[in-house]
Amino acid sequence: MERPPTDTCLVITDGRAGNVRQARALAAAMGFQDAPHLTLVPHRPWRWLAPRIAPGCTMAFGRDFTRALDAPPALAIGCGRQAALATRLLRARGARVVQVLDPRMPSSHWDVVVAPEHDGLAGDNVVTLVGSLNPVDDAWLAEAHASFSILSPLAQPRVALLVGGESDYVPGYDGTALARDLHRLADALRRDGGTLLATTSRRTPVAWCDALRTHSRDIAGLRWFAPSHAGLDDAENPYPGLLAWADRVVCTADSVNMLSEACATRVPVHVLGGDRVRGRLQQFHAALQARGRVQALADLGAPGAPVEPLRETGRVAGEVLARLDLA
C-alpha cells in the first residue's frame, strides 16, 4: 500500500508540550513532516472519562474535532489520554490510528499503540521503546548548531543543565537536594573551567530557579527560565542549541522526555537525583544505565568513553509503518 499523502495524516494532542513533541516526532519520522496538528479542547464530562466512550462524546473536543470526524483523515497519530478518545472515535469513522502512551485500556481499540517499556504494556499491536519519542538526531542537532551559532564563542567544556521539577517518582529530591547538587556542579566548573548553559521548564518550582541563580551566579554562560518564572516573557528557549553545543549534559532525574532527548545526543549525560528514583521511572533509568548512557554527577570531569546515542524514534516509526502496511 502506498503511504497516504501528508495532508491525510493528522496529529492530535491536548496541547501539552511533551505530548505534542512525541506525536510530531513520530509523524515526521514516518514521513509526514508537515502533518497538521489538531489541539483538542476537552469539555466536561468527557474530559474526565477519556478515553472511554460515553454518550455524546463526539462533542467532547469542540468544532475542529467535529469537522475531523465528518471528514476523517486516512491516518491519525494521537498522544495523551484525551487524544486516545479522539483517535478511538476517528477509528470508528474509518481512519487508521496510532496512539502514543499507554491509554490505560485494551490496546485493541487502536491500530497501533506506542508505549515506553517501563509502562509494562504488551499486546499484538503494541510497539515499545526505551524512553520517549523525540526529534533529536544528527540532522536535528546540526540545524540547532547552526541556528544557535551565537553560543560558539562560549568556553569549553560547555555543560548543558536541564532542570525539570519535583516528582512522586523521585521522592526526597527537593529544593535542598537540588541546591546541594548545583553547588557541586558549580565547584566542578570553577575547578575545570568551561561554561554552564542552563534551562528550566514550566514545571520547575520557583525555589529551584532561585537555587540555580544563586549557585551559578559567578559561572560563565547563560540561564533560560520559563516565562512563568522569569517575571517577563523571556526570549526563545535555547534548549535545542544547548543540546547541540554541549560537551556534556546534566539533567534532573524526573523527566523521561528530557533524559531521552539528552541521551539522543553524542555526549555524556549525568543525572541529578538518579539514586532516588522509584517505581516505573526506576526501570527507565536502569535501562539507560545498562546501556552505559548515563552517569552520576561525580563523574562529570572524568574522561568520557565513546557515546552511542539512544535513538528509538526512527526504529519505532519503521515498525509502525510496517504494521500499518505503509512501509
Image: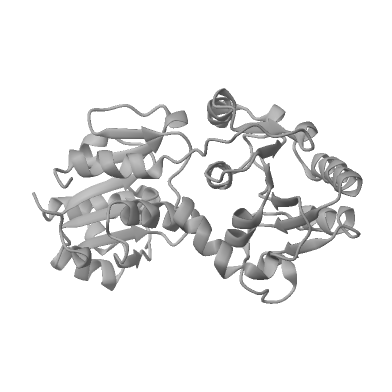
Q: Which residue is pictured at 76% across the width and 62% down the height?
A: 154
In this picture, residue 255 sits left or right of residue 217 = left
Front residue of 89/121: it is 121
Place of residue 242 in the rendered image (x, y in percent of width and height, measured from the top left): 64, 58
89 vs 291, nearest the viewer: 291
Circle count: 0
The colour scheme of the drawn protein is one colour
- Residue in front for this viewpoint, 249 or 86: 249
Q: Which residue is drawn at 8% across and 49% down?
A: 1
What residue sits 74% from the left and 37% below the top? 173
Q: Is 252 displayed left or right of 68 in the figure?
A: right
**Residue 136 appears in view:** no
Q: In this view, does 176 lie above or below 230?
A: above
Q: Quick one: 41 or 129, which is closer to the camera? A: 129
Q: Can residue 3 be seen in this view?
A: yes
Tell me which corner region of the image, top left, top right, bottom left or bottom right, holds residue 262.
top right
Asked if residue 268 is positioned above or below residue 42 in the image, the reply reads above
User: Residue 239 appears at what percent x and percent y?
Assistant: 61, 60
* Residue situated furthest left in the rendering: 1
Residue 282, quarter of picture: top right
Residue at the (47%, 57%) spot, across then down: 140
From the image, which quarter does the C terminus lie in? top left
